[in-house]
Image: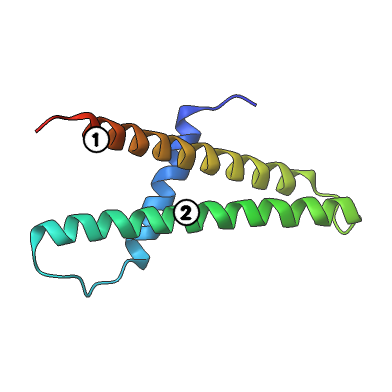
Amino acid sequence: MALDITELYSVSSQAVKEAAKNAPTNRPDTYADKDFDGLLHTAIDNLTTTNNYLSDAENEEIKWALGETENTHDLSVALQKASIALQYTVAIRDRLLDAYKELIQMQI
């Protein structure tokens, strides 16, 4: 299963757009708080979206296994969405951990 960068960008930009639409508007007035708060909400929404894609893929697998549907197209689309969203989430996690490790190693 090869990862296509355009698909990854499509899924990630969709997740960010959904997170921006659902983000609460009652945020603090300070600039630093808005940045961190927005980043935190986007990360949480990204995890929620990834979890939803994984649940959808699992539900499609169950339907197909039970013979409730013969549509393999929906199954393959759900599996691909879940795979790409999970790869994106893991990549973001790895980058954040690398940044954290770098900050910890800095000397003051």
Q: Position of residue 85 (x, y in %)?
A: 52, 43
Name the amino acid type tagged 1. Ile
Q: Residue at the location (47% across, 36% down)?
A: 8
Q: Residue 47 has which mark?
A: 2
Using residue 22 as the reference point, say whether residue 29 is left or right of it.
left
Near mark 1 (Cα within 10 A), the count class, few <14, some 14-19 or many ≥20, is few
Quarter of the image where one finds residue 97: top left
Residue reaching furthest to the front: 107
Q: Residue at the location (43% across, 51% down)?
A: 15
Cα–Cα span, label 2 and label 1 = 25 Å
Q: Position of residue 93 (x, y in %)?
A: 41, 40
Tell us which disc is closer to us: 2 or 1: 1
Above or below, comparing residue 69 to residue 98 in the picture:
below
Name the amino acid type tagged 2. Leu
Is 94 or 23 nearer to us in this picture?
94
Q: Residue 104 has which mark?
A: 1
